[in-house]
Amino acid sequence: MGDGERCRVLVDPRSGMPLFYPNLFVTTQVRNRSLSVASMDAACAAINVFLTHCSKCGIDLEGRIRDRRFLSPAELDAIRDICQRRFGKHGSAVVVPLRHNKAKQRVQTGSEYVRLTHVANYLRWLSHTLLGSTLDESAARQIELVHRGLTSRRPIGRRCADVKRGLTSEQVATLWEVVDPEGERSPFRHSGVRVRNALMMDLLFYLGIRGGELLSLCTTDIDWDRCQIVIARRPDEKTDPRQRQPLVKTLDRRIPLSDTLVDRLHTYIVKHRNKVPGARRHVFLFVTHKSGATQGDPLSISSYQKVIRAVAAASPELKGLHGHLLRHGWNERFSEYMDRQEAPPSPEQQEAMRSYAQGWKEGSGTSATYNRRFVERKAHETQLQLQKKMIRLPKGIDE
């Protein structure tokens, strides 16, 4: 939009026109609540899945709501099942119909939860909007039953195996071998791309920042005198040409840089970035090196994800790698470092330090999500020690 705001629009593929009620819902109930464009994207994607299902099953949604013939429990079960399916990739504008991706049958429970939540909210909102002043107590009760029926079908909790963890020490060693600009295992050919991608991994690993924060970095964010870098929120940035703008979800903060990281940043900017045609038109740190129409543009989210996939494919040990694992790893190393101190800061002080470094609001409790692996390991060690002290051994057996 003219002021730099990004929006998501659900489009009818036959006419090319935006769908009225879905986009009205996303605008008034998601966008106008000051939620992010990612939330709009998730709402559009969920409604897209739901509308595709209705179209295939011959469900005239608006007609049935006006006739007060609300969805049955069996139909709610079918909606839950379709929300579990994995579909092919879509572009920046979400478009019906979707094609089922048979190679990977099911989405993660988190995605299923979000889909069902948006579908439930959309159905309730649409029902109230269509019935308006004619809504009576009986219909209102039926609408709430449908909403509760969908929300009750959302997955509950996560299995222990689903908890996100950082890389092991062996995987970290492999990662550095793969992204070494001078190494033989690098999957990248161009020297500038190798240096850029290695620097990206360095910043993700050593600073524990998010992918969106990495792609939002500007050369002007680097304080060379103080050896610091600024993580700054720039929602709806006009100067950012990327349609899918990488966003900083956390608070603004300054992060100190080691001399090694400062040197690597300087080397990339002076010897590689500044020599890419078009790169000096903007201040975003990481740029596209490949020749073509986008050469010199800020690195896109899809290109960043492509780099991660290439690194993951370079070694079986890195299978399943994604950038956020490095953020989890930073939090594990932070906990291990604090645990090794002879006189560590108090838990409250550690929480405040971690929250500032990661951009969380102090006292938000977010650190528990990223510290799960360390806590789990310490709990296991304690449990084993307790078992050794308390277990009853058979007579004549020396422990």
Image (tube, helix red, strand yellow):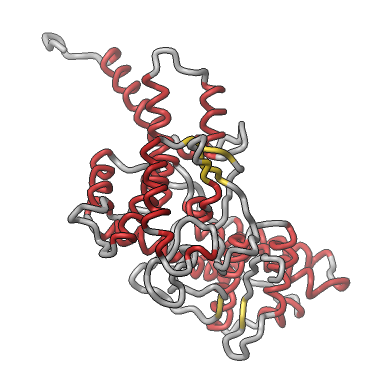
Q: Is residue 118 visible?
A: no
Q: Is residue 12 visible?
A: yes
Q: Is residue 10 above or below residue 271?
A: below
Q: Residue furthest right?
A: 133
**Which residue is pictured at 28% across the width and 12% down the height?**
389
Q: Quadrant of residue 303 in the image?
A: bottom left
Q: Is residue 208 above or below residue 6?
A: above
Query: Where, quadrant-wise, is the N terminus in this rendering?
Result: bottom right
Q: Residue furthest left?
A: 396
Q: Quadrant of residue 356 in the image?
A: top right
Residue 337 placed where, x, y %? 39, 25
**Which residue is pictured at 42% across the width and 31% down the height?**
334
**Which residue is pictured at 65% across the width and 64% down the height?**
238
**Left or right, 339 with reference to 19:** left
Looking at the image, how many numbered discs can be counted on the residues?
0
Q: Quadrant of residue 292 in the image?
A: bottom left
**Which residue is pictured at 20% across the width and 52% down the height?**
183
Query: Where, quadrant-wise, is the C terminus in this rendering?
Result: top left
Residue 161 placed where, x, y %? 36, 46
Instruction: Work out whether residue 399 or residue 343 is closer to the camera in this orientation and state it.
Output: 343
Residue 43 placed where, x, y %? 61, 65
**Left or right, 186 with reference to 36:** left
Instruction: Work out whether residue 363 or residue 355 is closer to the camera in this orientation and state it.
Output: 355
